[in-house]
Image (cartoon, rainbow, N blue to C red):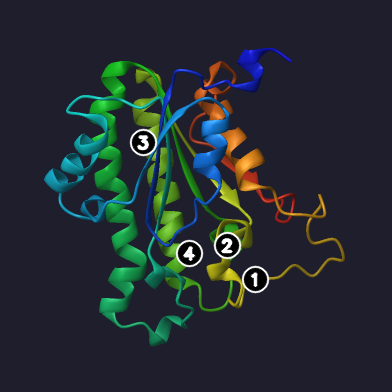
Amino acid sequence: MSATAERPLDGQTALVIGLGLPMLAGVAEGLADAGAAVTTLDDPRLGGAADEVEAALSAVLGPEGAPTLVVLSLLAEASTTLEPLAALDLVAWRAGAVEPIRVAMRLLTALGKRMKPAGRGAILFLAPSLSLVGGAGMTALSTALEGQRGLMKAVARQWGSSGVTVNWAAAAPRALSNHFDAADLAAKGDPVPIALGRRPDARTEIAALAAWLAGPGGRGVTGATLMVDGGEWMVP
């Protein structure tokens, strides 16, 4: 195997942004294994106004730096509190369902100002697959994730001609965070719940998908929802 195949991101900059619930363990290490210069960012300013978001990015990228790859996880802990719709008051709804969408919008706007002029780059949202199948008490969670996913598709279409791709990876929730271990998650009824018999590994498999999207092979893929759950939920 060639050195390029082993380290497809040699000389490239990768930014790993985890805001809220930590779900990116192993991804930064996997991108470093692929040769990228990786910066992780969980600055609380990313959840603020536009000038605060820009200040947080400038602190790690400089005033005009543009990463080759950005992996995002933007899910508030409030989103994962399982409650029936009737039990959610307006404050809880805004915190769990609305604010993660607003955060994603502000962050994409700031990243676009850097990446579109560079004429290249890949952005990948990484999220649990739960919103694709639903479940009891997951109203805020499904709204936050599907809102972000819809935003991803709209931005992918708008930015396509600039050379910047934007995609979504839906992963097995327990592969992303032990926060989901005790949750009342949606369950499949068939006898083989995971086709591969295991959940994909974040460092060796999820990070490899992100690296591929940032390379020549992935440049034709944008606006896509990519399942990396080992074949647990085979949905479009």
30 vs 77, left or right, is right
Question: Dot 4, how many residues are within 10 Å of its Cα: few (below 14), some (14-19), or many (20+)?
Answer: many
* Mark before the other along the chain sequence, 1 or 4: 4
Question: Dot 2, how many residues are within 10 Å of its Cα: few (below 14), some (14-19), or many (20+)?
Answer: many
88 vs 56, left or right, is right
Secondary structure of the residue carrying tag 2 is helix
Give the percent coordinates (x, y) of residue 175: 62, 57
Residue 142: mark in rendering: 4
Q: Which residue is mark 2?
A: 130
Question: Dot 3, how many residues are within 10 Å of its Cα: few (below 14), some (14-19), or many (20+)?
Answer: many
Q: Determine whether 1 is above or below 13 in the image.
A: above
- Relative to the observer, which residue lies in front, 6 or 154? 6
Amino acid on which disc 1 is placed: Ala
Amino acid on which disc 2 is placed: Leu
Q: Which residue is mark 1?
A: 186
Q: Which residue is mark 3?
A: 155
